[in-house]
Image (cartoon, rainbow, N blue to C red):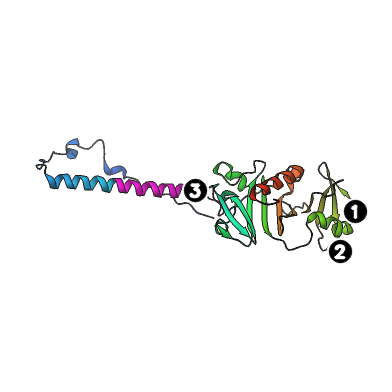
Amino acid sequence: MAGPEVRTVGVSNWERKVPNHAIDRDDDQGLYTVRARPRPPRGAATWFLKMTTMCLVVAGAIVLIDLGLNWTSALNVVDGRSSDPTPVAVFLGEQRLTVPGNMIRFEDQRVVGPQERLDLAIHWPSLMGYAPETRADFLDQSAEAPIVFMTIRPRETATDSAGRLASVYQHFFEGEALPAPKGLIGRRLSEDSGLAGEEVYFEAGSTTPFTTHCLATDDSGYPAPCLTEIHAGDALSVQIRFRKGLLGEWAGIKRATRALLLTFGLFS
């Protein structure tokens, strides 16, 4: 959702330079005088040669334009991503999804047909895929990087994050409540949970609470990530990941990701 992402293609530069000594203004200009050659009489052969040359020039121009367009397209790719928003129809199991190509992180997943999983990177809060103007955000390595990552795949567990809050997490809370964004309660998990060093943040007073677990912020220099999982459709789950610096945006992320999944064909 930044950096790279991204899904990586390299870019080459070409440059040709004419030596400075090729033409010297102080040289005798007579050395560069070009004498006109006698023109041969025009005939059918001359006309044919002229038309052939024009056709070759036009064909060469078309090839150069095509190469230029392909090279420009390569410039718009980072970490395997594409800036082309054309929707791609894929199948996860029996579920058909239609997803903008520039949201799909990996090239081999931007193929019409069946997939084992779909990995997405989405700009926040625009909810758009990769574009040249947001390239810096997709490469952002800070704790507040404005990218939300999503992985859609066949369901592997009976419960999502909200279900695990009641069945697992709450039995391993220790210590006092942690400072948390408005509307959330934060608790630290004990070593007995097998998730020592992780924290759970959940929505207060909801029957289907937004629930995410995050790594505790430390001095390692690596931004702490947060992960939440929701069930979608009949047999799919969606993992949503973002940097802990976006935790304060939890309510917007909860609403927006569900709305986005609807546009893909889930929850229908």
Residue type marked 1:
Gly
* x 58%, y 58%: residue: 109
Q: Which residue is tagged 3?
A: 75
Q: Quadrant of residue 33?
A: top left
Which callout, 2 or 3, points at the residue further toward the start of the chain?
3
Mark 2 to mark 3 CA distance (whole Å): 49 Å
Q: Position of residue 131 (x, y in %)?
A: 56, 44
- Report crowding for label 2: few under 14, some 14 to 19, many 20 or more residues within 10 A (C-alpha): few
Query: In this picture, which residue range is highlighted in magenta?
Result: 58-83
Q: Residue 224 got which mark? A: none
Badge 1 local density, few (<14 within 10 Å), some, or many (20+)?
A: few
Q: Which is more toward the observer, 119 or 206?
A: 206
- Residue tagged 1: 175
Q: What element carries label 3?
A: helix
Amino acid type for the residue under numbered disc 2: Asp
Dot 3 or dot 1, earlier in sequence: 3
Where does label 2 land, which residue?
192
Kind of residue indicated by mark 3: Leu
Question: Counting residues from the N terminus, which is met first, the one under dot 2 or under dot 1?
Answer: 1
Q: In x, y percent, where is residue 116?
A: 63, 62
